[in-house]
Amino acid sequence: MTMGPVLIGIYVFVLACFVGFELINKVPPTLHTPLMSGANAISGITIVGALLSATTAPPTVSNLLGALAIAFAMINVVGGFLVTDRMLRMFGKKK
């Protein structure tokens, strides 16, 4: 019996959710800012891939998913920079 590509994709997604949840719970608060910077870099790569997916010629589901990925990745990047900036201001000199 063979598994279809969609079933394999769902299986990998569910496993990634569990692994990601466990990893995030184990991170101490002092490492939050450096990890957020890394996540912003990864989201930047996601934006480039989503732009390529969203700009294919005929409108398809791939275009819609690419546009959705662009929106979510941009929210992540902007939010990450705002959080990182706020954390860095907390450790800066007081005026």
Image: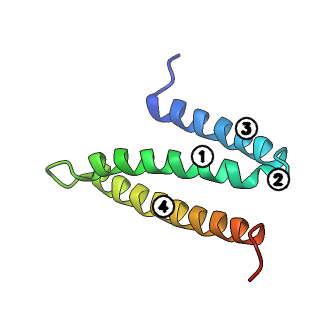
Q: Which mark is residue 79?
A: none
Depth check, front residue: 93 or 72: 93
Distance from Cα at disc 4 to Cα at disc 3? 21 Å
Seen from this angle, which residue lies furthest top?
Answer: 1
Residue 50's x, y, as percent?
36, 49
- In the displayed structure image, the side of residue 27 where residue 16 appears, left or right: left
Q: Residue at x 43, y 44 (%)?
A: 45
Marks 2 and 4: which is nearer the front? 2
Depth check, front residue: 2 or 90: 90
Secondary structure under the numbered disc 4 in the rendered image:
helix
Distance from Cα at disc 2 to Cα at disc 4? 26 Å
Residue type beneath disc 4: Phe
Mark 4, other Cα within 10 Å: few <14 / some 14–19 / many ≥20: some
Residue type beneath disc 1: Gly
Distance from Cα at disc 2 to Cα at disc 1? 14 Å
Q: Residue at x 60, y 34 (%)?
A: 11
> Image quarter for residue 59?
bottom left
Reading the chain from its start, which is encountered first: label 2 or label 1?
A: 2
The residue at which mark 1 appears reads as 38
Secondary structure under the numbered disc 1 in the rendered image:
helix
The residue at which mark 2 appears reads as 30
The residue at which mark 4 appears reads as 72
Disc 2 to disc 3: CB gap under 8 Å: no
Depth check, front residue: 89 or 75: 89
Residue type beneath disc 2: Thr
Secondary structure under the numbered disc 3 in the rendered image:
helix
Reading the chain from its start, which is encountered first: label 3 or label 1?
A: 3
Mark 2, other Cα within 10 Å: few <14 / some 14–19 / many ≥20: few
